[in-house]
Amino acid sequence: MEIAPNTRPPVCKIMDYGKYKYEQSKKARESRKKQHITHMKEIKIRPKIEEHDLQFKMRNAEKFLLNHDKVKFTVIFRGREMEHIDMGREILDRITERFSEIATVEKEPVQVGKIISMIMGPRSTKKGGK
């Protein structure tokens, strides 16, 4: 195997190619272990949700955000609930207020038909460079 092709004379090394490929795959596996893939979690809410149920869902959302996952909050309206869209927006405002320290709003609340949705992502915890 050629180690330094640009030098005069080029430097070469005799090695077991199978062992070399195995070590490369092992390094790749180790680097994949250290990565975190961000998932999108969805929390569905109705506008007439009780306070305890909302608190329960917000605790779950907090776990997701602290695990560096994004959370999509969806408020679903049915029938006559469409007359009270302000209730849904009020719930989303409360959620935004609650998570303002650990998360940022990546997509503002948007109404599409009978659904209002908002996406929040975790705040980046990376410090400044060297």
Image (cartoon, rainbow, N blue to C red):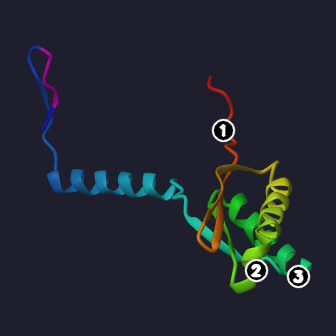
Foreground: 108 or 69?
108
Nearest to the eye among marks 3 and 2: give it: 2
- Which residue matches tag 2? 81
**Quick one: SS at disc 3?**
loop
Give the total number of marks visible in the rendering.
Answer: 3
Judging by the rendered image, the residue that carries numbered circle 1 is: 126
Q: Quadrant of residue 74?
A: bottom right
Residue type, label 1: Lys
Q: Which residues are magenta?
A: 3-7
Q: Position of residue 2 (x, y in %)?
A: 13, 33
- Please check the rendered image and state whether residue 6 is part of the magenta-colored stretch, yes or no: yes
Closer to the chain start, of discs 2 and 1, is: 2
Q: Earlier in the sequence, mark 1 or mark 3?
A: 3
At x 84%, y 75%, the residue is 54
Local crowd at mark 3 within 10 Å, few (<14), some, or many (≥20)?
A: few
Q: For the view shown, which residue lies furthest in the top direction?
A: 8
Image quadrant of residue 4? top left
The residue wearing badge 3 is 50
Q: What whole-number distance in Å separates the C-alpha atoms at marks 3 and 2?
A: 15 Å
Q: On screen, 2 above or below 65?
A: above
Which x, y percent locates residue 128?
A: 66, 28
Neighbor class of circle 1 (other Cα within 10 Å; few <14, some 14-19, many 20+) is few
